Image (tube, grey):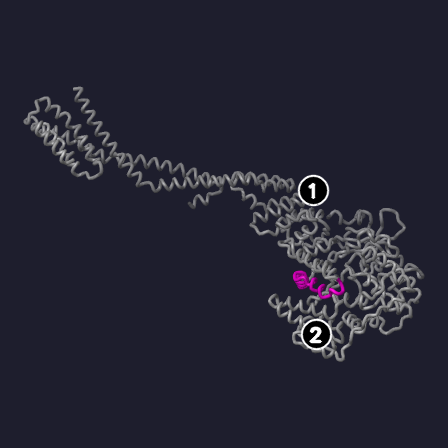
Amino acid sequence: MIWLSGLACGALVAIAPGIATVAAGLLAPGAVALRLDREPGRPVARTVLTCGLAGCVHPVMMLWNTGQSFDTAIAIVSDPAIVGIAWSAAAAGWLLTQLAPLAVRAVLEATALTRSTRLRAARSRIGEIWGLDQAANDR
Amino acid sequence: MSDRHEPGPAVLVGGEYMVDLTRPLPDAGGGVAAFVATGRRASTDSLMALAVDRRVPARPRALYPGIVGIEGLLTPLAHGGGPPIDGRPAWFVICRAPSGPPVSSALRPWPEATLIEFVMRPIAAILEQLQERGVTHRAIRPNNVFQGRPHGPVTLGAAWSAPPAMHQPTVAETAYTALCHPAARGEGRVADDIYALGVLLVTLAMGRPPMEGLDDKTIMYRKLEVGDFAAITGGERLPGLLSDFVRGMLAEDPEHRPLPALLRDPGGGRGRRVAARPASRAQRPFKLGAITVWNNRTLALAMACDPTEAMATIQSGTLMYWLRRGLGDSALAVKLEELIRQHTLDLSADKEIAQALLVMRAIANADILMPLCWRDLAIFPDGLGPVLAVALDAEPELRRKLHDMVNYEAQAIWATIRDERAPAGPQRMESRQRRAVLQIKGPAGGLARLAYTLNPMLPCASALPGERWIANIAELAPALDAIAADSPDAELLEPRIAAFIGARSERWLDQEIQALGAEGDATDRALNALRLLCEMQNRFYQVPMKGLSAWVAARARPLVDRWNNRERRVAVDAQLKVLAGLGNLRPILALLQDQAGHAADSEGLRAAHAELDGIDGELRGIAGGGGRRAAIAARLGQEIAAGIGLAAVATTLILAALG
């Protein structure tokens, strides 16, 4: 897989060195995430990369429209605004991977708490009707 | 019941006879309290009412109508509750009143011819008729024989209001019956009446009571030492013909006494003389306790009077030595030695019981005519019923002796020893039946149950009804109702009441009575008591009993608490209060033992338990599911984030494509 990826990258550098340069500059946080994420399926790197990709679409279009020259690619990569937007998108992706599980956990806990409250009420009612109050409390 | 015993002229014995307690008849009852009685119908006969002591029952066999109409006998006409004596409910036996004073009122020597014609022959005729009806008199004594006119036959008094021979003086009975507890002398047989008649004839012939001034033990001893005839006549000469009769009538062995038919015919009777072999007399006496023993008969008496000393002399062997060397009765000595060998085997059981059995056997072997002697208590088995009745209100020691006697089937052992006199089979069976009654488990068994069973006329001996005379269950039911109303905390089904119900319910309530003795918790006990009272009301007293219903309701808490469903329990409780006010026990029973309802209740409880288990499982799952939820949240969060990333890419691509 690594070899295939290297081959693809090499092919890209050979065929379209401008695009390769822009991608390398703008997707650097994604590459870092890919390197650091050791989770199965690399969920963090995946989101950081997709968000970084979203930030690369406009600069790549701009390069494509201006003839894909290497100089233009260097100019784009050296533009702090473009690099900031692309890296911010990657950062937003990383932030999303951190916040989304917390939000989901909060929803699940709230659901469990509601269910637990309902069950305790039902248990108390049954215990009272059948004289199992003490037994119910002991459990 | 209480209505029946309120003072006033309306209280009629047997619905027919009125008792006038202001006119006592001191000499008419032969020692029993007697009062003038009058019938509702006009009659020339003067009547008397004999008071029955509530602790000693009247003779049920003698009160059946079969003996009515015997000429010369004060036969019973009716019996039942009457006006209270000293504020206490009383029971009376109505008889014809005697037409004259008792012969004891002015004792003088009677001529022989008069004695035979006006005393012996009339009484013999009466005894013959009683014998045909299967009844004995057992109360022939000078103060119970009456003479209306100087030259006329005597009238035999009543003998129905107390146990047989209970009021007989010692001299009028053989030593064997006199030795017994007064209530335990038994129905006996006609030979016992013949003996008493013989004593009466001697009394009237001599014009004074025989053996006067001697205490009971001396009288018995003299009779056994020198023979009944010699002891009673005291060496005084009787007219020839009378002497012959009396000698036969006072024979030691009942088999040798003449039958009543022979006494009605003096010519024939005189010719029949059967003499028993006199008891052999020892060359030297043997001292056993306070009694000097000269023969086997006095030996039996001494052992009966002092069983502890008897045991000691038997175990030490001194008695057997005297029997061989002094009395020359090796056969008895061998028997006693055999008893000691048996005793060593019996020692595996209760030592006291084993000793009582040994002495009892020794006494019966020494003199086959002796009654059943258990420790220092002597009874004839057919007198067990009355003595049990007496024992209910007597000291516990008497009850213990009687209990052991029945429990160890002493009657069967005693009967086996005297098998040559009477077949032991029926006695063994009777003994076993009595033991079975005694051993009935629970409050309805024991000595009280046996006492009620053997005494059909014994009133309820419980302390709860107090002095009320409760003769049957129909009277017990309202009494219990009143007690329950007055004392809600009273334990109504205490052993003497339970035993009374068991004995008097004619097997109708057997099942319920047996259930009272069953092991169980408070619920079972309450339900069994309720079933018994309900059945009693249903069968014997179908009148609302509010006191009893309230009593039952107050004790039904465990039964109400059996309902698991709280709402149902509250409803049952409310319904119970309503039903208790109506006084009918059957609906209360139906409410509390509703089996279909209880089955549904149990099923509901089972379902509730299952539901609770399900809920608890789910709650445990929620409580322990934090880690699982965290894992789900992490996975789902990453997926959502990835989805948002892809959406962002897609959106920017679409926007780029649209320019």
Q: How many numbered circles are shown?
A: 2
Q: Earlier in the sequence, mark 2 or mark 1?
A: 2
Task: Look at the numbered disc 2 and give the secondary structure of its residue.
Answer: helix
> Could you tell me the amino acid type at mark 1?
Gln
Q: Which residue is mark 1?
A: B542
Q: Which residue is at a point 28% across and 39% down the rendered structure image?
A: B631
Q: Which residue is mark 2?
A: B333
Q: In x, y percent, where is residue A121?
A: 42, 38
Q: In x, y percent, where is residue B85?
A: 77, 54
Tell me the number on the disc at residue B463: none
Q: In x, y percent, where is residue B292?
A: 74, 76
> Could you tell me the amino acid type at mark 2?
Ala
Is residue B217 in the magenta section?
A: no
* Same chain shared by disc 2 and disc 1: yes
The magenta-colored residue range is: B396-422
Q: Which residue is at a point 82% across and 56% down the rendered structure image?
A: B34
Q: Is residue B453 visible?
A: yes
Q: Is residue B399 visible?
A: no
Whether residue B645 sits left or right of residue B153 in the image: it is left
Whether residue B112 sits left or right of residue B498 in the image: it is right
Q: Nearer the viewer, residue A36 or B522?
A: A36
